[in-house]
Amino acid sequence: MGMGAKSSTRVFGRLLLLAALLPSLAAAQGVEDLSDEALARAGIRRLESERLTLYTDLPSIPAVDQLPALFDQAYPQWCQYFRVPEEQVPPWHATACLMRAPERFKATGLLPPEVPAFQHGYTLGDHFWLNEQPSDYYRRHLLLHEGAHAFMFTRLGTCGPTWYMEGIAELLATHRLADDRLELKYFPRDRDEVPYWGRIKLIEDANAAGEDLRLERLLPTSPRELTDRLGYAWAWGAAAFLDGHPRARDRFRQAAKLVRAPDFNRRLESLLDDDWAQLSAEFGLFLHDIEYGYDFARTQLDWQPGKRLPAAGKKVTIQADRGWQNTGVALEKGKTYELRAAGRYVVHQDPQVWWCEPGGVTLRYYRGRPLGELLAVVVPAAKAAAKSPPWGDAIPVGLGGALTPAQAGTLFLKVNDSPAELAENQGELQVEIKSASAAAPTSAGARAN
């Protein structure tokens, strides 16, 4: 069964369940006719806003009581993202249960017995249910995640294949709250902003364990394969990458129009057209280098194939405030090249300016190498780079040395720094690339001395 069939089967299953639940959900609406006092005897409160009726057994605290108002702030942002009008007849409204003790909600009929067991949240149509979470942030996140499902299910008609359904819900639930103003689709700058979210840490750990998180593996995943926290992190990573990448963003957002298509993935690839292989390769780079505050604009790659190195060599300029940069030079497998670098640039500014040369500064290390040190990687064509990501094979160059590629490809260079901190860098360095007069490599891999 193909991905479209699997996704359709899941959605069809939910539609059948929703149809079976309609009498129960309709009966549950009768609870809305109960007085607050009657609900209180059941240990439940009702909170109302324009877009949400929230039943909860949590005590009255600001972090809980503000949830319906925040949900109202989310609604126009969802409309804008999916390009649907805000106004609808009748007005769009959702019902949710936020539960510490689910048995209270079962006793009142707010949690129908037909709803399957779930760990965190579950959505059917414009109804969803949430279990209490360990932080104020993650409680809001889960409310917004399930709310995004409800919005897509009712306003778009369905949610698309599993990875898109969960990835978009995660993307639109990851948020910042400042002065009671809600900002969705937020890429966290620090883990302290998002307690118990943990998506970046999950991806980092998966990378360290050698998990295969390529985009090509994610798209055909079945619902069962995305049930753990890594699956949600993986789906979030794909949505955040495609939505954040300057070349992909506008076209990826058009995918919302495709959610009813059984061949969604094929149509998405067609939408991204010639960039698909390159974006797949860059997704591997994003996962390898992922950091809080990742800068998509400064890390996008130039995939123009390199040309053979002229006999006289070539000089290139590398910007300190960018990620991997294409030198325009194609290197041959097993041939030795000499690199020489010079320049002075800034790699840190707060609380004071740190000047740096290509050897890096040992006041601070990033991923085991001096901050600001010149690094090199040989990148094959995009399709090959997507299948076998080269980003873990970065070679320290520093002020210079010999480099013998283990594979043919285009030479990319950058200074060693976090992709979240490139914006504070300033300046550039010059690198001279020449063919070495001597000979055979001394090892199977690339090296720079």
Image (spheres, rainbow, N blue to C red):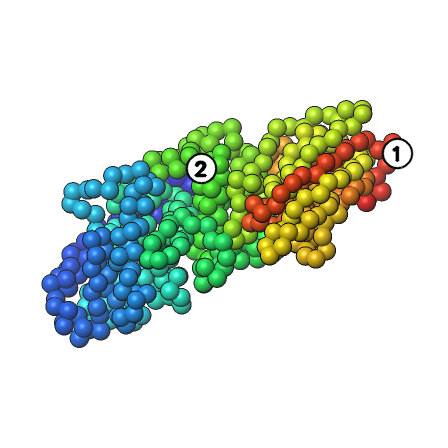
Residue extending furthest toward the bottom? 41
In-image side of 288 versus 39 (left or right) = right
Percent from the top left, x then y, of residue 82? 33, 40
Considering the numbered disc 2 on the image, is that residue within a helix, a strand or a loop?
helix
Considering the numbered disc 1 on the image, is that residue within a helix, a strand or a loop?
loop
Using the image, determine if residue 172 lies above or below residue 48: above
Rounded to the nearest angstrom, the CA distance separating label 2 from label 1 is 47 Å
Identified by mark 1, the residue type is Ala
Instruction: Confirm whether residue 352 shows in the render.
Output: yes
Residue displayed at 64% across by 51% down: 353
Q: Quadrant of the N terminus?
A: top left
Residue displayed at 27% across by 65% down: 65
Percent from the top left, x then y, of residue 245? 49, 39
In-image side of 184 versus 394 (left or right) = left
Using the image, determine if residue 81 lies above or below residue 41: above
> Residue 249: which numbered mark, if any?
2
In-image side of 317 versus 199 (left or right) = right
Kindly check if marks 2 and 1 are in contact, taking CB atoms under 8 A apart as contact. no
Using the image, determine if residue 159 lies above or below residue 46: above
Identified by mark 2, the residue type is Arg
Q: Alpha-carbon neighbours of circle 1 within 10 Å: few (<14), some, or many (≥20)? A: few
> Residue 61: which numbered mark, if any?
none
Instruction: Confirm whether residue 220 shows in the render.
Output: no
Question: Can you identify the residue that label 1 sits on?
Answer: 438
Q: Quadrant of the C terminus?
A: top right
Percent from the top left, x then y, of residue 250? 42, 34
Using the image, determine if residue 85 lies above or below residue 93: above
Residue displayed at 72% across by 36% down: 430
Q: Quadrant of residue 239?
A: top left
Q: Quadrant of residue 89?
A: top left
